[in-house]
C-alpha cells in the first residue's frame, strides 16, 4: 500500500490547513483569482437571465414595432425600409451597451451595500485581475444580450450580417467600455439612488442619442457634438457598418482604434481606483 | 392660556378624567388625509428619481422618435408628427408613474414589513384604496404636467378640449394607480413586480397608439389596440389637444369609467379579504 504510506509521511494536517511547504507564490497575473471572480460574475448573470436577456429582447421588439407602425403611410416604401434597417443594429447595440454597464454597476454597488465587497478586497486578488474579470464578464453579458436581440430581429426584419467578426468586435469592445464605466459608477456610488441617477441622466441619454435610433447627422448642433464625443457613438457606428456593410460615419479601423484606446484608458483608471480602494476601504 | 397640544383636536373626557377614544364617523378623514400625505411625501422626498427622471426619459423618447421618424413621417392625419407625438408621450408618463407609485409603495411596505402600520390603524379598505390611489394620481399628474410644460417649450401644444384632457389624465392615472395597487398586493418579490412592468404595463403602454395613428396600422394591430384600455385614454387625451381622434370618444369615456369602477371594486375586495396582506 504505497499510497497510504506516502500520505502518512507527507502530512497529517486537515485539508486546506496552512502548509509551509506549499508554493503560495502568486504570479504577476493571478489566474485562479481572475477565473474565480469571472465565474462568479457570469453565474450571477445567468441567474438574472430574465432581466438581462429576455426583458431587453422584448423591449427591443416593442421599440421596433413602435417605429415600424409609427412610419404610417411610409411603411413599406423605400424610405421607410431605410429607417428600419438603420434601426436594427442600433437596437442591438442599445441593449449591449446598457446591459454591460448595468451588470457591473449593480454587482459592485450591491457587494458594497451587502458588505460582501470585503471578501473580494481581502482575497489575494489584485486590482488588475478584478477589473479584467469585470470587463470580460460585462463584455460577454453585453454580447449575449445582443445575440438574443439579433435572433429576435431575424424573425421580424431578417438581414444578413456583412462582417460577423467585426460585429462581434464592436459589440464586445463597446460592451467592455460600458462595463468599465459601470465599474467606475459602482465604485463612485454610495446608494442605489446615485446609480439610478447616473443611468437616467447620463448613460441612457448618451446611448439613445449616440446614433442608436437616428443618424447623428440629423441632430441639432450641440447634441451632435456631444454624441460624437462619446465612445458609445463609435461602438454603435462601427457595429452598424459591420452589420450593414455600408454607411459608416467613421472609417471602421479608426473607430476600432478609438474603442481600444478608450478601453485601455478606462481599464487603467478603474484599476487605479480599485487598487486604492477609493470609497471601498475606510 | 396656550393649550399644551394646539394641533390635537379636543377630546371628550370620561367621568374619570381620561380622554375618550376619538369617535370616527362614516369616513376617517384624519386617517385618509394622513395616508394620502404620506404617499405624496414618499415620492416627493426622492423627486429626482420620481419626477425629474421620468421627465428626462420622456423627452428622450420624444427626441429619438422625432429624429428617427421626423424626416420620413411629416404628418399624421392633418397634424404634424411632432404635435401628434407630444400628448401621447405625456399620457405615457402619467400612466407609468401612477403605476410605479402605488405598486412600489405597497410592495416595499410588504417586503420591509411595515405594511402592518397601514393595516392596523382604523382605516377601512375603501379609505386605503382612496389614499393609495390619490397618491398615485398626484404623482402621475405632477409628472405629466412637468413633461407637458417641457415639451411645449420645443413644440407648442394647443388645447382643443380642456375637459377631455383633465378627465382622461385623472381617469388614466386612477386606472394605473389601481393596477399598481393590485400588482403590489399580488407581488411577493421585486422580481414579480419587474415582470409585471416589463411584460404587461410597458407593452400595453407602447403599443397603444402613442407613436402612431391606429388608422394606418394593419387590422391585427387595430384589433389589439381596441382591446387595450391604454388606447382609449391616450386617444381621448390626445383629442383634447389636437381635436383629432382614432376611436369613438364616447366608447372611450365608457371604457374609462367601467374599467376604473371594476378595478376599484377588485382592489377594495382584495383589501377586505386581506389577500396576501393579512395572514
Image: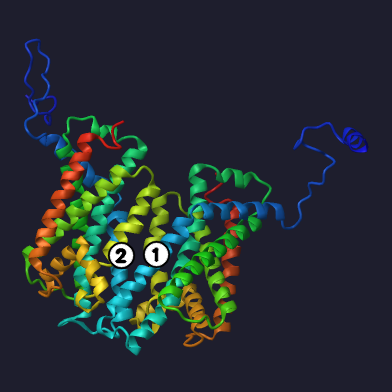
Of tags 1 and 2, the one toward the viewer is 1
- Colour basis: rainbow
Q: In the rendered image, which quarter contains the N terminus of chain B?
A: top left
Q: Is mark 2 on a helix, strand or loop?
A: helix
Residue occupying image coordinates x 7% and y 65%: B250
Labels 1 & 2 near each other (Cβ < 8 A): no
Q: Position of residue A149 (x, y in %)?
A: 46, 69
**Among the 4 quarters of the image, the one containing residue A5:** top right
Total count of labels:
2
Residue occupying image coordinates x 46% and y 75%: A154
Q: In the rendered image, which quarter contains the C terminus of chain B?
A: top left
- Viewer-proximal residue, B14 or B115? B115
Q: Where is residue B68 in the image (x, y as percent from the top left)?
A: 33, 79
Residue occupying image coordinates x 38% and y 47%: B190
**Label 2 CA crowd tier, 10 Å (few <14, some 14–19, many 20+):** some
Q: From where the camera sits, is residue A259 visible?
A: no
The residue pinned by badge 2 equals: B56
Q: Which chain carries label 2?
A: B
Residue B254 lies, with reference to residue A191, above or below; the image says: below
Asked whether, in this view, residue B128 is left or right of residue A240, the answer is: left
The residue pinned by badge 1 equals: A58
Residue B14 lies, with reference to residue A56, above or below; the image says: above
Q: Is mark 1 on a helix, strand or loop?
A: helix
Q: Position of residue A130 (x, y in %)?
A: 62, 55
**Among the 4 quarters of the image, the one containing residue A205:** bottom left
**Label 1 CA crowd tier, 10 Å (few <14, some 14–19, many 20+):** some
Q: Mark 1 lies on which chain?
A: A
Residue B250 lies, with reference to residue B28, above or below; the image says: below
Residue occupying image coordinates x 20% and y 44%: B132
Q: Position of residue A94 (x, y in %)?
A: 44, 70
Residue B54 lies, with reference to residue A211, above or below; the image says: above
Amino acid at each position: 500500500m504505497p499510497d497510504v504510506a506516502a500520505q502518512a509521511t507527507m502530512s497529517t494536517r486537515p485539508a486546506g490547513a496552512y502548509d509551509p511547504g506549499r508554493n503560495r507564490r502568486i504570479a504577476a497575473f493571478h489566474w485562479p483569482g481572475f477565473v474565480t471572480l469571472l465565474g462568479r460574475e457570469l453565474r450571477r448573470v445567468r441567474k438574472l437571465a430574465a432581466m438581462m436577456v429576455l426583458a431587453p429582447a422584448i423591449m427591443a421588439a416593442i421599440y421596433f414595432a413602435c417605429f415600424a407602425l409609427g412610419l404610417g403611410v411610409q411603411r413599406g416604401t423605400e424610405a421607410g425600409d431605410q429607417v428600419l434597417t438603420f434601426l436594427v443594429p442600433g437596437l442591438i447595440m442599445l441593449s449591449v451597451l446598457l446591459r454591460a454597464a448595468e451588470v457591473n454597476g449593480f454587482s459592485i454597488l450591491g457587494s458594497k451595500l451587502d458588505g460582501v465587497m470585503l471578501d473580494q478586497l481581502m482575497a489575494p486578488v489584485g486590482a488588475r485581475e478584478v477589473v479584467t474579470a469585470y470587463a470580460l464578464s460585462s463584455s460577454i453579458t453585453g454580447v449575449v444580450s445582443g445575440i438574443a436581440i439579433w435572433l429576435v430581429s431575424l424573425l421580424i426584419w431578417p438581414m444578413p450580417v456583412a462582417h460577423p467578426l467585426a460585429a462581434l468586435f464592436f459589440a464586445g469592445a463597446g460592451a467592455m467600455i460600458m462595463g468599465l464605466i459601470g465599474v467606475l459608477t459602482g465604485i463612485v456610488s454610495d446608494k442605489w439612488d446615485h446609480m439610478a441617477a447616473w443611468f437616467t441622466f447620463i448613460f441612457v441619454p448618451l446611448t439613445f442619442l449616440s446614433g442608436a435610433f437616428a443618424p447623428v447627422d440629423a441632430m441639432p448642433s450641440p447634441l451632435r457634438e456631444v454624441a460624437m464625443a462619446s465612445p458609445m457613438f463609435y461602438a454603435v457606428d462601427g457595429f452598424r457598418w459591420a452589420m450593414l456593410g455600408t454607411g459608416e460615419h467613421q472609417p471602421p479601423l479608426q473607430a476600432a482604434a478609438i474603442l481600444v484606446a478608450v478601453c485601455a484608458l478606462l481599464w487603467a483608471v478603474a484599476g487605479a481606483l480599485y487598487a486604492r480602494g477609493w470609497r471601498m476601504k475606510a | 392660556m396656550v393649550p399644551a397640544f394646539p394641533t390635537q383636536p379636543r377630546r371628550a373626557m370620561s367621568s374619570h378624567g381620561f380622554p375618550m377614544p376619538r369617535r370616527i364617523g362614516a369616513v376617517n378623514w384624519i386617517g385618509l388625509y394622513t395616508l394620502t400625505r404620506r404617499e405624496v411625501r414618499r415620492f416627493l422626498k426622492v423627486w429626482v428619481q420620481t419626477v425629474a427622471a421620468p421627465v428626462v426619459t420622456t423627452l428622450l423618447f420624444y427626441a429619438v422618435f422625432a429624429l428617427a421618424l421626423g424626416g420620413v413621417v411629416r404628418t399624421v392625419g392633418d397634424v404634424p408628427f411632432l404635435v401628434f407625438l407630444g400628448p401621447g408621450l405625456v399620457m405615457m408618463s402619467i400612466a407609468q408613474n401612477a403605476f410605479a407609485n402605488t405598486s412600489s409603495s405597497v410592495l416595499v411596505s410588504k417586503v420591509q414589513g411595515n405594511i402592518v402600520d397601514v393595516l392596523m390603524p382604523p382605516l377601512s379598505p375603501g379609505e386605503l384604496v382612496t389614499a393609495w390611489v390619490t397618491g398615485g394620481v398626484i404623482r402621475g399628474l405632477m409628472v405629466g404636467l412637468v413633461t407637458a410644460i417641457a415639451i411645449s417649450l420645443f413644440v407648442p401644444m394647443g388645447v382643443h378640449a380642456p375637459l377631455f384632457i383633465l378627465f382622461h389624465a385623472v381617469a388614466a392615472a386612477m386606472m394605473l394607480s389601481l393596477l399598481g395597487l393590485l400588482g403590489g398586493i399580488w407581488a411577493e418579490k421585486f422580481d414579480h413586480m419587474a415582470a409585471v412592468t416589463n411584460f404587461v404595463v410597458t407593452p400595453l403602454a407602447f403599443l397603444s397608439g402613442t407613436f402612431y395613428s391606429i388608422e394606418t396600422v394593419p387590422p391585427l394591430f387595430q384589433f389589439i389596440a381596441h382591446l387595450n384600455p391604454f388606447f382609449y385614454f391616450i386617444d381621448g387625451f390626445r383629442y383634447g389637444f389636437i381635436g383629432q381622434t382614432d376611436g369613438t370618444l364616447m366608447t372611450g369615456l365608457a371604457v374609462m369609467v367601467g374599467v376604473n369602477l371594476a378595478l376599484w371594486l377588485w382592489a377594495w375586495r382584495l383589501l377586505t379579504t386581506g389577500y396576501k396582506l393579512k395572514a
